[in-house]
Image (cartoon, helix red, strand yellow):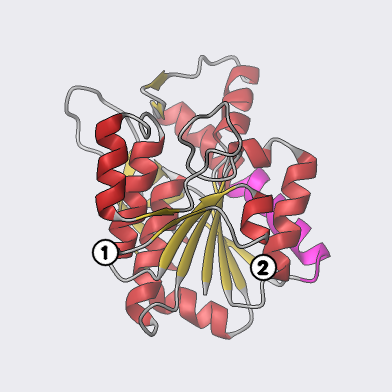
Amino acid sequence: MIILKIGGNILNNPAALAEALAYFASLPEPAVLVHGGGRKATEVIAAMGREPKMVEGRRITDAPTLEIVTMVYAGLINKQVVADLQALGCNAIGLSGADGNAILAAKRPVKTIDYGYAGDVLGANAPLLVTLLDAGLNPVLCPITHDRQGQLLNTNADTIANETAKALAAARPPGSVALQYCFEFPGVMRDIGDPDSWIPTLTPASYADHKAMGTISGGMVPKLDNAFAAVAAGVGEVVIGDLAALRAGRGTRCVPG
């Protein structure tokens, strides 16, 4: 079983999105797709006369912004992706976290920064997802969750992918669930300017070494922290790479060691 996460760089490029969805539709295994869409949300927020607010790469989600991102993520992007998959013969079903209680979250506590209606994922509903997968339906999850009290929340798509993989790994035979992050590089890079500098395999120990040396830093750190949390929870492997790498069975593999 594969959980594939695609981000804004793919969603904003029609050709790249078409290729990514064709790859997803071609997977022989049961599969779940998780998408973000932050760039499109930023465009719509600006077009509606509001100023997008970001702190350290995370969106400040006040009440009007929550309305907009819900429309964009759970509506426009999610349903277009589902329609595109249906056109490829992939029987997909689009879900927010509230649909079938698919993803439960809690409002992020206010510490030094108030992120507003941002959610921290508490878990994914593995029985629901397994039921859909066993029925031949491929869930497509967007980054809108809920708190079971009627409050929708804007949630990080990488975290949703990670928690979904962990939940399904607990419900399936050991090592039978894989998580793939599809982004713009062929893998985790030692040098962004050198396309041949991708790292084939990372273990918890080698990841710690790369962080200490500074070859892995910035935005890759939370992504890899999530990846190794998934591996520790029983996900067979986490692969990070661009579409060409994933198709070729390459990318950077995060494994237990």
Q: Which quadrant of the structure image shows residue 161?
A: bottom left
Q: Out of 190 and 227, give the one closest to the viewer.
A: 190
Q: In what element is the residue under mark 2?
A: strand
Query: Disc 2 marks which residue?
Result: 92
Q: Residue furthest left?
A: 111
Q: Residue at x 26, y 39 (%)?
A: 108
Tell me which segment is drawn in magenta: 74-89
Query: Disc 1 marks which residue?
Result: 232
Q: Quadrant of the C terminus?
A: bottom left
Magenta-span inclusion, residue 84: yes
Q: Amino acid at mark 1?
A: Ala
- The label shown at residue 165 is none
Q: Nearer the viewer, mark 2 or mark 1?
A: 1
Residue 122 visible in the displayed image: no
Q: Position of residue 40 (x, y in %)?
A: 63, 32
Left or right: where does residue 129 sit relative to residue 153? right
Q: Amino acid at mark 2?
A: Ala
Q: Position of residue 55 (x, y in %)?
A: 36, 21
Q: Out of 224 and 136, give the one closest to the viewer.
A: 224
Q: Residue at x 50, y 35 (%)?
A: 67
Left or right: where does residue 33 sit relative to residue 161? right
Q: Which quadrant of the structure image shows residue 253?
A: bottom left
Q: Position of residue 70 (x, y in %)?
A: 53, 41
Q: In what element is the residue under mark 1?
A: helix
Near mark 2 (Cα within 10 A), the count class, few <14, some 14-19 or many ≥20, is many
Q: Residue at x 58, y 30 (%)?
A: 194
Q: Main secondary structure of the magenta part?
A: helix
